[in-house]
Image (cartoon, coloured by chain):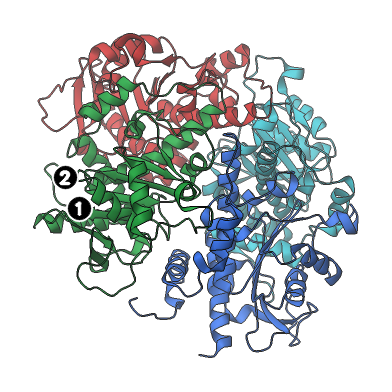
Chain colours: A green, B blue, C cyan, D red
Amino acid sequence: MSQRDDVLRDLVIGNRVLSNEGVVDAYGHLSARHPEAPERFFLSRSLAPEFVDLGDIIEFGLDGETATGDRRAPYLERFIHSSIYAARPDVMAVVHAHAEDVLPFGISKQPLVPVIHSGAFIGGEVPVWDIADRFGDETNLLVTNSEQGNDLAQRLGGNNVVLMRGHGFAAAAGSIVDVVRMSIYLPRNARALMNALRLGEVKPLSKGEIGARSRGGGYRPNSPETWRAWQYWAHRAGCGEMLPERPED
Amino acid sequence: MSQRDDVLRDLVIGNRVLSNEGVVDAYGHLSARHPEAPERFFLSRSLAPEFVDLGDIIEFGLDGETATGDRRAPYLERFIHSSIYAARPDVMAVVHAHAEDVLPFGISKQPLVPVIHSGAFIGGEVPVWDIADRFGDETNLLVTNSEQGNDLAQRLGGNNVVLMRGHGFAAAAGSIVDVVRMSIYLPRNARALMNALRLGEVKPLSKGEIGARSRGGGYRPNSPETWRAWQYWAHRAGCGEMLPERPED
Amino acid sequence: MSQRDDVLRDLVIGNRVLSNEGVVDAYGHLSARHPEAPERFFLSRSLAPEFVDLGDIIEFGLDGETATGDRRAPYLERFIHSSIYAARPDVMAVVHAHAEDVLPFGISKQPLVPVIHSGAFIGGEVPVWDIADRFGDETNLLVTNSEQGNDLAQRLGGNNVVLMRGHGFAAAAGSIVDVVRMSIYLPRNARALMNALRLGEVKPLSKGEIGARSRGGGYRPNSPETWRAWQYWAHRAGCGEMLPERPED
Amino acid sequence: MSQRDDVLRDLVIGNRVLSNEGVVDAYGHLSARHPEAPERFFLSRSLAPEFVDLGDIIEFGLDGETATGDRRAPYLERFIHSSIYAARPDVMAVVHAHAEDVLPFGISKQPLVPVIHSGAFIGGEVPVWDIADRFGDETNLLVTNSEQGNDLAQRLGGNNVVLMRGHGFAAAAGSIVDVVRMSIYLPRNARALMNALRLGEVKPLSKGEIGARSRGGGYRPNSPETWRAWQYWAHRAGCGEMLPERPED
């Protein structure tokens, strides 16, 4: 299989995992940059992630328009993806989702800080993008053009995650597996933080701990620990048989 | 298929979707106005929504009485539906449900305001109808005649949703798909709001944002986005095979 | 079928329903008074309610001892049941369970009051029985003899439900269907109340409303509304085929 | 079957039970001491607990290194297990998990105290181990060597459970069944406590009650009550057929 085939396979698995783990429902999407043509990315046509298969995936350019003349209805918010790929050459995969337990941190003033080791990717705290800041308070809150997408990407900056006020979040990472992992642990960190705040003062991860984990002290792509979770999520989502073979499995 | 057949099919799908998504259980119901005879509406006999099939659906008049002489036991609270259809010619479908996370807003003084884009249909805030205000504090809280139904419909006014103190809510919309969507997102908006309030001050959707979404900037019937959710919910509820065919699917 | 057979069948269905609805897990139990011999009652041997079948049911006397010489291990806490049947001739079925969302009201000072129409059976508020009040603070919290059971039954008094501090609750009703219904709606009322209290001042059901519902204005045994829920719960629990036939079904 | 075979079988069942009950996901692990060679213990290779089978189990020494030359990737945090077995000769089984509802008590100052009878094993309160106290604030929070493991074991002391700040918990008991039981009831006690604290002042179990339960007044290994839960959990996890036969079952 080519690198492209690997990415498309992981994109299908990732879509179903995100749905099965409750990160996306009928809405929300996962994309991946073309591994051999960095100015293009893959994203499903307008379809609930649970149903996404290889044939549903469309190739887009960094302007958010179809690169291959495909005429099927695309996601309205594909500009979230195109703008992040344009702004961040290091990013190979993007998730946009409305995961419920993340929403409170986009509409209150409490910062979403990392409090569990698996939430270290959050960094110091998650920035919040409010579409009203630049586009006024008469939008429909959706990111439906490159201007809005670019503004969101700017707020994301060099972070892994940005919250979108009254809407959801976007996550960006170096691989599909990694961005799926972040999208699953972001709501979990949010819940732990919400519950802990109700108990009183909370101790978040320290800068040193966040740094240690991001420097490879924690998550490493292709490690047995990473594979363990990917295999687990894929089996739970009913697509374990799509996984490539690995020694020992 | 006739328009009537389409409505009856969607009514069956909608019943099962509402049950599968946890909006209704043994109680709660979904109705639809007759598309060709606006003074009539369709509603199941007294049956848990999960089990509703075409043969269970009864035709009622706007007085809440059976229009066809059907003698099977009807829902006691069918007057919620008849009164709303009588008061609101624009309404083509109604849900009454007890969804758990909506209940707190009917028994406290905290208004249920929209805080997520998919909750924009809530409008400025959801009105609360307290049966005791007009009918005293010795009712059984159920809406079991037209007088109570009409009072509820009046409190609903031109809104999409009205809460019923100590009981649940009623939602009214221009189509079955739309009223089901509202009934699924109402509890989600309620949960996001409850959790955010515990974190401090909350920023709701602005009037402009609510307006932009209701003017078609957000949800549009028959759009790919609307269909995407309907298809997703129907498949999850195990009745995906009842869906009509659409291009690309 | 005899009345006894009907009760045994409902007892099996009720055990599985309570398990499937999350009211009991490996622990907790449902009993029913013998319909023809009021000084006896039926209760499973020591077994998780999900697995209870006709052959597991043992007949007990009002002293909590086996009435038929059955030597299989009984539940340690069968005295909850025997004592309530002894004290309350009107009671035909009893549940003891540890349902999680009811527990907070047994260990704090906030009374569990009815706030939703389906919680009207709670009455003015649920009494809390603290085993330490009479038996000191060195018990294992279980009700393992008639003395403790009688003390609990006394605290229950003429109510439908009593909370047990740090342990769970006991519910008593005129039929299996009714006690199962109460056991399912008690945690739901508890959750609605907990969430509403976090939003501020709460309006509970009025005395008049509680009275109206208990006088048959709300729940009536054998009504279509009652059957609707029993049928729904039984099907969800996988034992719908055990239900007796009814007209229209 | 030998004692060793019994332990290995229970270890497989226990892994799947912990996964099915939501205590572990892709991460977290269960080990058991070798019943005939107390300086060794059994632990799966790096694999999600849901998938663990007999062939995945590796034998380790009390230094956390493979005792049999097995070269498959082990869990990074096996030192949690080895250090506890080294420090506590009475301990026959250990769980490490990240169960979500326990996390708030590791990052706030609210002690996790027992409030329900099934949480009595918590003791007076659960100690919290903060890796930063001794190893500084630049670790990745994982326990990846014996020095860290020994420090954790020391904080555990003679208790059954220790929380790990920003990470999870470790539980230690005299049998696999017992440590699984503790791991399931720890989050439940945590939820009851969190909810009760929001209602006001809370009454925890008394010292006398904790003592009465730990002296066998509550949980007893091999009692019908213990077996009832083990059987229930195993069936729910889909491995009921692995259970040994018992009279009456």
Crowdedness of circle 2 by 10 Å Cα count: few (<14), some, many (20+)? few
Q: Position of residue B229 (x, y in %)?
A: 45, 65
Picture residue at 53% right of the left edge, 35% below the top: A109
Q: Nearer the viewer, mark 1 or mark 2?
A: 1
Q: Which residue is mark 1?
A: A243
Picture residue at 31% right of the left edge, 42% below the top: A181
* Residue type (three-letter) at the residue carrying disc 1: Leu
Marks counted in the figure total 2
Crowdedness of circle 1 by 10 Å Cα count: few (<14), some, many (20+)? some
The quarter of the picture where residue B132 lies is bottom right
Q: Position of residue D208 (x, y in %)?
A: 62, 12
The quarter of the picture where residue A183 lies is top left
D95 or C134: nearer the eye?
Answer: D95
Q: Chain for mark 1?
A: A
- Against B225, residue A142 (above or below) is above
Q: Secondary structure at mark 2?
A: loop
C103 or C64: nearer the eye?
Answer: C103
- Viewed as shown, does residue C139 lie left or right of B127? left
Estimate the spatial distance between the alpha carbons at disc 1 and disc 2, rounded to whole Å. 10 Å
Q: Is residue B74 visible?
A: no
- Against A75, residue C177 (above or below) is above
Q: Which residue is mark 2?
A: A249
Look at the numbered discs 1 and 2 and tell me whether their residues touch, using CB distance below 8 Å.
Answer: yes
Q: Secondary structure at mark 1?
A: loop
* Residue type (three-letter) at the residue carrying disc 2: Asp
- Viewed as shown, does residue B190 lie left or right of D23? right
The quadrant of the picture occupied by the N terminus of chain D is top left
Q: Position of residue D10 (x, y in %)?
A: 33, 33
The quadrant of the picture occupied by the C terminus of chain D is top left
C59 or B243: nearer the eye?
Answer: B243
- Viewed as shown, does residue A91 lie left or right of B133? left
Q: Chain for mark 2?
A: A
